[in-house]
Image (spheres, helix red, strand yellow):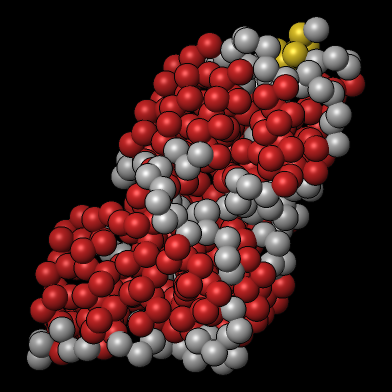
Amino acid sequence: MQLEDKFGADWTCSDTATISLWNAAMDSYLDFSGSPVGDVQSITDPEFLAGPAFCAAMKLLSGMDPSDPSILRNLEDMQAARTGGVEDGHATAVDLLARGEPTAAAFAWDEVLTRRPNDILAHKCSHETWFLVGNGAAMRASTSTALQRLPSSAPCFAVVAAQHGFALEETGDYAEAEGWDRIALDLAPRDCWALHCLAHVFESQNRHNEAMGLLEAKQPIWTKQNLLSAHIWWHLALRLIEMGEITAAMAIFDDTLAHTPASNQFRLTDGTSLLWRLELHGVDVGDRWRLMADKWGKAAQTHQNAYLDLHSAFAFASCPDHAAVSLYFDSLEVAFEGASSEQANTYAEVVLPLVDAIRVFPDDKSKAARLIAPLLPELHRIGGSIVQREIVERSFTSALIATHQPEKVARYLDPKIATHPNTPWILRDRAAASERMGDVAHATLLRRRADAMFAGWS
């Protein structure tokens, strides 16, 4: 039989209780709280394709190996539930994702949406998969098309509005992004993704006081949304670093991010990124790297997500005597030998050389800079947001400054200052370059401009 979920999409089921369980799990999923994958896996309806498709997609997007037994069971259950109808598009997309073809998978989910505009699973999986491959233009096209097909009264409209706002921010259209994110928050005040997206807009425009104010005002809500709260803490910590509030930023790591479980690697990236950025800022983080290396070591031989592997490399490069270091680097070298998928190509062309650069960064910054330079135009392929990938750019300029190459810093950062004239880290690294070139007056002015971005905050 066909039953309609709370978003207006029909699903084949054999049990009338299935849709109630699905709706409750989607509430948790969209609220970034609870354990939605576990909740969906408890649905035992053999005809309900959405259940195993959701579970497999979430596991694959989180970096699990496609050969993991739980994923293989999900894939088997999903194939057994095929009906020959439009729902099968989810199975097609998940299969592509499992075979290392995320772009094709994202297009498959977009195709589902042409026939099922109220399909919340297709909306979320398309968005997260375009995010995985760092294709902001395709993400924007997807969300723009989706909004054209949805009336504003649709139950999933707020979700898609927030996703569109994020896509607009990632493609540089900040004014329109802010409008869509505010609409999403008006419709769904607890929408953690919309909150996160609006914070991105403020940060991208260097409206740091507004970003801080927004996150602090909504703190009673997002701190209870366990699946995204670590990332929101990370955003808050980045603003504190830029303000020079190092003790407060370090406290976010010690009180919150240090306690992230090793089982959730995406949440581990926030603490890892924070430590690396603190060190780029000249802060001694003590023995905190060993804690992170211990956690990354739990999956040292799993290489399925470029963004996760970058952060593993940060931890192991910073703790080179850790027992898992050889396991990580040796297994990464051969992870995609003989493969020709999109994922394999990304690893060969971007991830492996980038990890090599990170590995040598602590001891040979000149070599690290040489390795990073040709990869900068391809960074989007590791996935994540612009501000997340910015850590590689900051490592590059930091390495150039440390190895007395200020002219290269100027050549790289001057075009960025032209398009983002008030970004503090860009101004400060450019100031360091000017100082090394003997132009102290210019360096002083750039630093004053950076500091002025936080005037009035207390």
Can you tell which quarter of the image residue 117 is in? top right
- Residue at 89% across / 21% down in the picture? 17
- Residue at 40% across / 43% down in the picture? 341
Going by the image, does 120 lie left or right of 421?
right
Residue 82 visible, this angle: yes
Query: Could you tell me how many numbered marks the image carries?
Result: 0
- Residue at 61% across / 18% down in the picture? 88
Please provide percent x and percent y for residue 408: 13, 75
Q: Nearer the viewer, residue 142 or 440?
A: 142
Seen as rendered, the residue at the extreme front is 338
Q: Nearer the viewer, residue 353 or 295?
A: 353
Please provide percent x and percent y for residue 400: 22, 81
Residue 275 visible, this angle: no
Q: Is residue 380 above or below residue 410?
A: above
Q: Is residue 138 above or below residue 270?
A: above
Q: Is residue 221 above or below residue 315?
A: above
Can you tell which quarter of the image residue 60 is in? top right
Q: Nearer the viewer, residue 457 or 268?
A: 268
Please provide percent x and percent y for residue 453: 35, 68
Please provide percent x and percent y for residue 146: 47, 22
- Residue at 58% across / 85% down in the picture? 322
Q: Is residue 77 above or below residue 433?
A: above
State which quarter of the image contains the N terminus: top right
